[in-house]
Image (cartoon, rainbow, N blue to C red):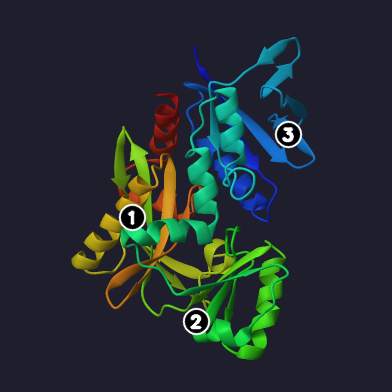
Amino acid sequence: MKQKIAIIMGGYSSEYKISLKSGNVVYETLNTEKYDLYRIHIFENKWVYVADNNEEFPIDKNDFSLRLKDSRITFDCVFNAIHGAPGEDGYMQAYFELLNIPHTSCGMYQAALTFNKRDCLSVLKPYGIKTAASYYVNLGDTIDESAIINKVGLPCFVKANKAGSSFGITKVYKREDLKKAIAVAFKEDDEIIIEAFLDGTEVSVGVITYQGKTKVLPITEIVSNNDFFDYKAKYLGESQEITPARISEAMAIKVNTIAKQVYELLKMKGFSRSEYIFKDGEPHLLEVNTIPGLTKESILPQQAIAAGLSLEDLFANAIAEALK
């Protein structure tokens, strides 16, 4: 009997369009001889199954089931392709764990922790994980420009604390632009992290659980055509993503070791992609993503292919791991 797989996509954040693309790639890639696949759109105003003719059928949130004609459908596993809230911040993980439905993403605590950049970096620092100097601001705080610049210097990055895909990020060169950048970040979140600019090679490292073991994928070097790796660089082709990265063997060993350490320290499972910048030869962690982009152009799929894994292998393994 074929397994029934719900592929959840969409979400409540600015990343919903990217999530729909990721979810559809998963839907088009998985083997329909092995799985019955259901595209589930999760939005604030509706949770629906979307049939191939685009007809929509509501999901019963009481048990995450679906009624089609005279039959009630429940799912063997949920493939989580929601970037941002509520799929990457722990809410969907907690919901499925309460319902005892296997899902492909990490646990509720790990999702909530990694989605909060400030908390994640704070948890990892005692283990020797290097990060940029940072300054925290919450909505309603007095903005002390002098204190910020004394701590992180210029240029610096102003980031929404809980957002992805570079939404709410500004690179600031001048003191007079600081408050405007903070206002941009507050449109995405009520917490902000302001970080020192690290001038060095930027890399992205995918780490997954594959056949029961932690597997580090080939490293990708990020070369943005823009001022930094912003939304346009990530999704509109305004960057070079070079896999494997053009770095020395010693640098590769260092960042691979740290990426694996981060994955295992946080007791992760499923997909992850962490970002680093080398400063003085040492990788400094920027953030950890637990629902990375899964489109054919996205970094993690590129890394999987470079490692000899097809997208079908990558996605089917995620389901197999979830069902263990």
Circle 1 residues within 10 Å: few <14, some 14–19, many ≥20: many
Residue 111, position as x, y percentages in the image: 52, 45
**Tag 3's secondary structure?**
strand
State the residue at coordinates (51%, 31%).
103
State the residue at coordinates (66%, 90%).
176
State the residue at coordinates (24%, 67%).
251
**Tag 1's secondary structure?**
helix
Residue 27 can be seen in this image: no
| Callout in the foreground (1, 3) | 1
The residue wearing badge 1 is: 259
Name the outermost residue toward the left: 250
The residue wearing badge 3 is: 47
Q: Is residue 134 above or below residue 256?
A: below
Circle 2 residues within 10 Å: few <14, some 14–19, many ≥20: some
Q: Amino acid at mark 1?
A: Ala
In this picture, residue 99 sits left or right of residue 43: left
The residue wearing badge 2 is: 151
Question: Quarter holding the C terminus?
Answer: top left
Name the outermost residue toward the right: 45
Q: Quadrant of residue 158?
A: bottom right
Name the outermost residue toward the top: 70
Do the numbered discs 2 and 1 sit on residues whose CB atoms are within 8 Å?
no
Residue 319, position as x, y percentages in the image: 45, 30
Residue 267, position as x, y percentages in the image: 38, 42
| Callout in the foreground (3, 2) | 2
